[in-house]
Image (cartoon, rainbow, N blue to C red):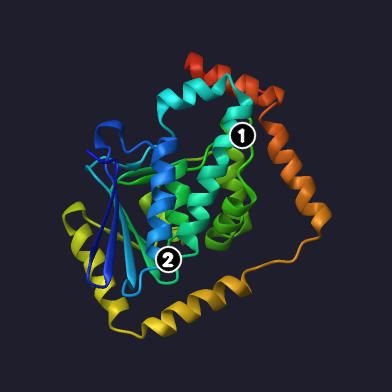
Amino acid sequence: MSTIILNIKEKVAYLRINRPEKYNALTQDMWQAIADACDSLANHKTVRVLVLSAAGEKAFCAGADINELHEMLSLPDRFAASNEIVQLAQKKLAALPFATIAQINGVCVGGGMGLVMCCDFRVTVKQASFAITPSKLGLLYSLEDTKRLVGLVGLARAKELLYLGRKIDAATAERWALVNQIVAPDELESAVESLVQSILSVSGYSVSGTKRSLAHLSEVMPSEADTLAIQSLFDKAFHGDDFKEGAAAFTEKRPGRFI
């Protein structure tokens, strides 16, 4: 059975992560499938809304596949290279020329957070929790992911999430503007469908044009030197002592002891 499923019903596309037995953890092949699905949708003439969802009742996405992660923890170069497909898939999702909705059915961490932050709307069940944890592995969050997070929750809240790797509940996520709406589990699909119909009730041209305008206005123009310097820090983290300690702590199932 496919772990990434794309269905299109008239003007609505449904992209589903389908690996509930593994809490919808994402493999590199799954990231590639998401990127491919976005390529297909970007050229679709009739789709006006995408609903991104996940199978099961416990997790939207628990992050990276544990087996691949264990392999990559001892291979920093491979870990760094794997980030390229993650960033590519997220970039393609964020750039889709129509409205996108994340239907969050449970735990949302790691790559799951990256995906939902690329969407225009986020509707979640009240039992969901959210976390971003590169600091617990001695790594940095990518510039694009960090920019999206700051755009949603602001600088102070972004620091709290990124520095501490803090897990927050759905009520906190809503208060911080990380999600748009909280519903009971049995109301999730109907709430998303109501939002879909609201989007379909307005001009697709306007939504697409406004989305493009907002993306343009959110762009910052940092110097190339600053961008390269931060990118260098990001790349070097994969070879740093903190990553070695974070990887060891993860493998040994203990708290990290960072200097």
**Residue 84, image x and y in percent?**
57, 43
- The residue under the point 45% across, 58% down is 93
N-terminal of the pair, mark 2 or mark 1, is: 2
Q: Amino acid at mark 1?
A: Ala
State whether residue 51 is above or below residue 108. Answer: below
> In this view of the protein, which residue sits in the foreground, 170 or 83?
83
**Residue 133, image x and y in percent?**
53, 37
State left or right for residue 105 relative to residue 233: left
User: Is residue 63 at least partly visible in the picture?
Assistant: no
Q: Quadrant of the N terminus?
A: top left
Q: What residue would you read off at disc 2?
A: 42
State whether residue 101 is above or below residue 55. Answer: below
Q: Quadrant of the C terminus?
A: top right
- The residue under the point 25% across, 63% down is 8
Q: Amino acid at mark 2?
A: Ala
Check whether the beta carbons of the residues at disc 2 and disc 1 lie within 8 A of each other.
no
> In this view of the protein, which residue sits in the foreground, 251 or 227?
227
Secondary structure under tag 1 reads: helix
Q: What residue would you read off at disc 1?
A: 80
Secondary structure under tag 2 reads: helix
Disc nearest the viewer among 2 and 1: 2
